Image (cartoon, helix red, strand yellow):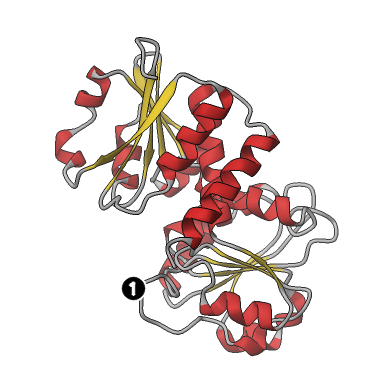
Amino acid sequence: MITRDTKLFGILGYPLGHTLSPLLHNTLFELSKFPGIYLVLENQNWQTMGLGSLEALQFKGLSVTIPFKEWAFSQAKTSCSASQLMKASNTLYFNEGKWEATNTDGLGALRAVQETDPTLVGSKNSLPILILGSGGSAKGIAYALRNATNSYPQDLYFLARNQTSTEDIQDLLKDVGNGNLFSITLEQAMDRRKEFGLIVHTTPVGMKGWEGRPILPEAFFEKHHCLFDIVYNPMKTDLVAYAQKRKANVILGYKMLLYQGIAQFEIFTKLKAKQKWIEKVDKLLLQALLKRK
């Protein structure tokens, strides 16, 4: 029911034909009885259109996806430390007459890991982490993981083709968290595979319509490993299949979508998401993704 008190939110991006964000946010609004509605704002010209029309319509918050995350960061008067580091934001919210920016992608990934096994990051028993890739997703996730290692040192390794971007990430993160930062080759990773605990795959390899073989072979995986593959379409990538065949634990990619959205909801509404709401949305997202097979 839309009334004069209904607050407007939406997602900016292009294309947005398969976005699950409206399902996530509108379900949370309904469960929390928050007077909000979340719309799909699909347009390839937001950079030239600007945010003026949305301000006029009194939009209160926006999710931002490709290709506008860098542009969104540039539109904000203030931004969080993660946004400043990455020069990109996935969340805009209107506060006291100005747009503020934050980035919940890394927070979503970290929470997905911590909900699965809190010993994987930032505990005295945490093993070194291996991140596959060095793009924007790797940067955001690595930042969040590093922020969680202040109490105990935890080394972070990057396995990526682009050595320059890997060095850039290491330079950006050198003063964040606790532990060493390393680049590693596939051969070195294979030799040292027993040392790792969490493996995070951040590249598009395995995504529907994306060509390429998995970065790691099946023989890499050990039973004590936990693989977090952020690809969620399809949910079971070849890399996930390798890990499962070797009896390693797996965190499915849609969990990052879930928890980054939960973080956005809490920013938008200033409400704390209840566990039963999270479980409901988790179930609905999983059902929607299974229907896409």
Q: Nearer the viewer, residue 44 or 80?
A: 44
Left-right relation of 50 to 169: left
Q: Position of residue 86 (x, y in %)?
A: 43, 49
The furthest residue to the right: 124
At horizontal 43% and vertical 23% (from top left) the residue drawn is: 36
Quarter of the image with the N terminus is top left
Location of residue 128 with respect to 68 vertically, above or below: below
At horizontal 42% and vertical 74% (from top left) the residue drawn is: 162
Q: Nearer the viewer, residue 87 or 102?
A: 102
The furthest residue to the top: 4
Label 1 sits on what residue type? Gly
Choose top left, top right, bottom left or bottom right for residue 38: top left
At horizontal 34% and vertical 73% (from top left) the residue drawn is: 209
Location of residue 279 with respect to 54 vertically, above or below: below
Q: Position of residue 272 (x, y in %)?
A: 63, 27
Disc 1 secondary structure class = loop
Left-right relation of 54 to 76: left
Q: Position of residue 27 (x, y in %)?
A: 50, 35
Location of residue 210 with respect to 228 vertically, above or below: below
Crowd class of label 1 (few under 14; some 14 to 19; many from 20; radius 10 Å): few
Quarter of the image with the C terminus is bottom left
Choose top left, top right, bottom left or bottom right for residue 248: bottom right
At horizontal 72% and vertical 67% (from top left) the residue drawn is: 128
Q: Position of residue 197 (x, y in %)?
A: 74, 69
Query: Residue tagged by mark 1?
Result: 209
Residue 172 seen in render: no
Residue 235 seen in render: yes
Total marks drawn? Answer: 1
Q: Nearer the viewer, residue 189 or 67?
A: 67
Q: Nearer the viewer, residue 144 or 63?
A: 63
